[in-house]
Image (tube, rainbow, N blue to C red):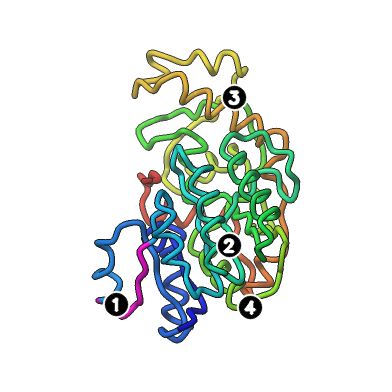
């Protein structure tokens, strides 16, 4: 029997949001949740959600899990072997005869393939593999989660200073709205062999976020933008959590991209798909801090 929609990563942050929309708006016989953990079967079936076990490291489980699937939501992983895993997913989707692959990419570089952000490179490779596979696909370049603002600022509630090597504009999006938009575009269909971008239509800087932290929580946090070379040497009092130098290299590279405009691009498609204006980055950050003045993103 044909399965119209299969949602991978259904226990993850984005996948859960997509699945929630399907549960509320699509007949249960038309979709199933997929996870690499076979023990999650009962979790979903207790909610009357069909389940398929798919392990990105196991080609056989992928081919079996993708059998008779029309629309596959291919949620990217954060594994160190992501490129190999993604190649395996594409191979299995091709073998299983999946009609349309919907891939969740990232928004670094906007519509271009120019981003040098390390995190974007596997996404660019996956998009190339999808194009070369002959599969019908849509790559959804998802905006950076607003929930991750503390990661990008490398800020914790006990710190009175945010120290960064640069500043720039980011079109942060609410994860719940990204999940809803992803579900809606799959249900709508179309966008064959296209790259689309999901963002709000506004951006925000680190300086603006620090101002919102202060206004919302009553803190007096300061933003300190220092030269990149000095940032990479942070230690001692400036690094009380003893983070390795690789951490600061990662943050610096990310802000190199942001200051160059890599997350500046916005697009109206998310508003069109949602049927309403997406939450602005400013309002998203305010909401998180009003709900919890000591908010920190938890992976």
Question: How much space separates mark 4 and mark 2, taking CA atoms?
Answer: 22 Å
Whole-Å distance between the Cαs marked 4 and 1? 25 Å
> What secondary structure is marked by label 1?
loop
Q: CA distance from mark 1 to mark 2?
A: 30 Å
Q: Is residue 50 magenta?
A: yes
**Where 78 sits versus 251, above or below?**
below
For the record, the magenta segment spans: 46-53
Viewer-nearest of discs 4 and 2: 2
Q: Using the image as rendered, state which of residue 57 and residue 207 is in the foreground.
A: 57
On residue 165, the disc is 3
| Mark 3: few/some/many CA within 10 Å (<14, 14-19, 20+) | many
Nearer-N-terminus badge (3/2): 2
Q: Is residue 272 above or below residue 12?
A: below
Q: Residue at x 59, y 37 (%)?
A: 207
Residue 114: quadrant of the picture: top right
Side (left or right) of 64 relative to 230: left
- Which quarter of the rendering shows the N terminus? bottom left
């Amino acid at each position: 029997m044909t399965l119209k929609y299969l949602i991978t990563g259904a226990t993850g942050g984005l996948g859960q949001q997509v699945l929630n929309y399907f549960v509320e708006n699509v007949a249960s016989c038309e979709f199933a949740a997929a996870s690499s953990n076979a023990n999650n079967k009962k979790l979903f079936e207790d909610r009357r959600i069909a389940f398929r076990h798919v392990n990105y490291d196991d080609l056989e489980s992928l081919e079996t899990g993708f059998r008779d699937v029309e629309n596959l939501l291919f949620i990217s992983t954060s594994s160190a072997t992501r490129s190999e895993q993604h190649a395996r997913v594409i191979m299995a989707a091709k073998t299983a005869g999946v009609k349309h692959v919907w891939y969740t990419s990232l928004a670094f570089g906007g519509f271009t393939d120019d981003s040098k952000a390390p995190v974007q490179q596997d996404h660019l490779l996956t998009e190339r593999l999808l194009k070369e596979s002959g599969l019908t696909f849509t790559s959804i370049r998802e905006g950076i989660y607003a929930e991750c603002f503390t990661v990008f600022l490398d800020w914790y509630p006990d710190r009175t200073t945010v120290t960064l090597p640069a500043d720039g504009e980011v079109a942060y999006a609410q994860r719940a709205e990204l999940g809803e938009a992803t579900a809606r575009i799959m249900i709508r269909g179309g966008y064959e062999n296209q790259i689309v971008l999901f963002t709000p239509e506004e951006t925000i800087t680190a300086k603006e976020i620090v101002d919102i932290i202060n206004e919302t929580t009553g803190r007096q946090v300061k933003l300190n933008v220092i030269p990149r070379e000095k940032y990479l040497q942070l230690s001692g009092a400036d690094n009380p959590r003893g983070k390795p130098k690789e951490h600061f290299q990662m943050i610096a590279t990310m802000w190199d991209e942001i200051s160059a405009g890599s997350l500046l691009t916005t697009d109206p498609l998310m508003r069109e798909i949602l049927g309403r204006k997406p939450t602005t980055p400013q309002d998203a950050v305010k909401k998180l801090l009003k709900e919890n003045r000591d908010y920190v993103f938890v992976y």
